[in-house]
Image (tube, rainbow, N blue to C red):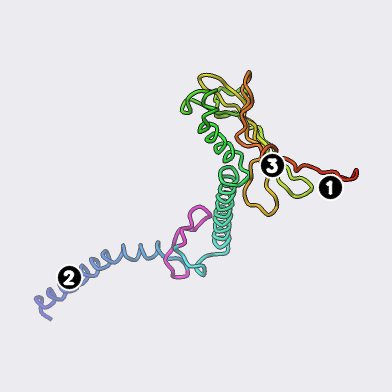
Amino acid sequence: MSGKTRALQLAYHARSSQLQNVQALREAPCRFYATQGSSSTGRPSRRAITVTSDDGRYHWSELSTGEKAARGTQQSFNFVFVTAGAIGTLCVAYLLYQELFAADSKTRQFNRAVDRIKADSRCRELLGPGNRIKAYGEPTTSKWARARPLAHTVEMDRFGTTHFKMHFHMEGPDASGVVNIHMTKRGDESELQYRLLSLTVPGHETIYLENADVASPKRAVGKMFGVQWR
């Protein structure tokens, strides 16, 4: 073998070694990433989920026993939270209805009576102009007039009739007085009916806007031969 042929072979082997080294360097990062990014099962590794970090991206079958417990705990907490919110909303709606719209709502009957007092010419003559008359409940230690509670009672008698009673104060630029209310509702009625609505101003006669006892006097009782006939 000539010296020239020998030199060509050596150059060829050296070139092949350089190409192999370059290829090995190129593949090394890929092998390193594959080694670091894969689990022993061959699946891509991921961050373990907890109660606070589970976002539902992984299927139930992909979770370990501990992760399934974490997801179950999270879903149970969410269910309880949503249920509590729904119950709270229903309670608030019920309380608002009872306070503002129910037939025996003290707020509803208070506003209704105040409007009638302000609209009555006899009441305005004693208290003053309607737009300057204010109404409030019982005095308290609170400095806010709106915080004064309304004195009222709701009772049912032995005949099944509901009795609603309330009194409050009304004050105008000329005088102040007390409003008394007595309303009833029988079992077959849906709304309270006035039996008494009056305004009492000290030094003046009581003004009756409603007085069922006077409006419906008892029938006269007749007598014949000493026997009362009704």
At x 60%, y 34%, the residue is 209
Q: Position of residue 173 (x, y in %)?
A: 50, 20
- Which of these two is toward me, 210 or 67? 210
Seen in the picture, residue 137 relative to 62 is either above or below; the reply is above
First-in-chain label (1 vs 2): 2
**Marks 3 and 1, how far apart in space?**
19 Å
Residue located beneath label 2 in the image: 15
Q: Is residue 82 above or below residue 206?
A: below
Instruction: Identify the residue at horizontal 44%, vertical 61% (top origin).
Output: 46
Q: Secondary structure at mark 3?
A: loop
Indicate which disc, 3 or 1, sits on the residue closer to the N terminus: 3
| Crowd rating for badge 1 (residues with CA inside 10 Å; few <14, some 14–19, many 20+) | few
Q: Which residues are magenta?
A: 41-56
Where residue 79 sits, quadrant-wise, is: bottom right
Of labels 3 and 1, the one closer to you: 1
Please tell me which of labels 3 and 2 falls first in the chain: 2
Q: Are marks 3 and 2 in contact (CB under 8 Å)?
A: no
Q: Which residue is mark 1?
A: 229
Q: Residue furthest bottom?
A: 1
Q: Which residue is mark 3?
A: 216
Q: Amino acid at mark 1?
A: Trp
Q: Main secondary structure of the magenta part?
A: loop
Q: In which image quadrant can residue 218 be found?
A: top right
Q: Is residue 5 left or right of residue 142?
A: left
Q: Residues within 10 Å of mark 2 (few under 14, many from 20)?
A: few
Residue farthest along the front direction in this orientation: 225
